[in-house]
Image: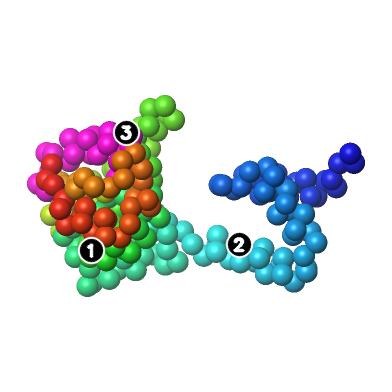
Amino acid sequence: MASLPEPIIALTAALARLPGIGPRSAERLALHLVQSDAGTVRTLAEAILAARERISLCRVCGALTERQPCTLCDDPRRDASIVCVVERPTDIFSIEKSGAFHGRFHVLGGKISPLNGVGPEDLRIADLEARLGTEPIQEVILALGTDVEGDATGHYLAKRLAPRSVKVSRLAHGLPAGSGLEFADELTLSRALEGRTNL
Ligand code: ZN
């Protein structure tokens, strides 16, 4: 079988690096794109570039944002005394969708995972401590995944924040076990937030 032209192979390889796209899907997409109308492909390429260039992480909370600081940090109607700590920027969307939280956020950027070489110093924990010193934060809600690593990260944070004069709580049980926030429906999340337990 004649191999594909090099640009198609290169495009396939680039697409295959995207999450959820296996080698076969990548090749199918690449073959589709090279046979598509040039204008359509240009629009797609420009949208990818524009989104990547305009979106960055909020320097305060770590949310995906088009401006610094983000609208969540900057909104005076949000309760600055309460901060919800999540693993990833996309977790913010899950919590916002539940409509049960009106405070601020803090993205850790992952969870403690010795197997993957991720330690506490790789997460935005020092930034959180710095915020405790400069913002009127009275409660930190840990809204982490219910898997082993999310649990371990929660325990570590609760211990590290214990000497601080801040209340630390975690989401009530009821989230799907062994998963992240994106798998919880809105009602479950809002119940977990309302029924949060003190640590
Ligand atoms: Zn922010």
Kindly identify the amino acid type of the residue bearing the numbered disc 3.
Val
Q: Position of residue 94 (x, y in %)?
A: 35, 58
Q: Specify few, some or many for label 1: CA neighbours under 10 Å numbering under 14, 14-19, or 20 or more.
A: some
Kindly identify the amino acid type of the residue bearing the numbered disc 2.
Ile
Q: Nearer the viewer, residue 4 or 44?
A: 4
Q: Specify few, some or many for label 3: CA neighbours under 10 Å numbering under 14, 14-19, or 20 or more.
A: some
194 to the left or right of 146: left
**Which residue occupies 72% across, 51% down?**
28
Q: Nearer the viewer, residue 167 or 21?
A: 21
Return the mark for residue 100. 1
Sequence-first disc among 2 and 3? 2
Labels 1 & 2 near each other (Cβ < 8 A): no
| 2 vs 3, front mark | 3
- Judging by the rendered image, the residue that carries numbered circle 2 is 48
29 to the left or right of 61: right
**Which residue occupies 33% across, 64% down?**
97
| 1 vs 2, front mark | 1
**Which residue occupies 80% across, 50% down?**
7
Sequence-first disc among 1 and 3? 1
**What is the secondary structure assignment of the residue under circle 1?**
loop
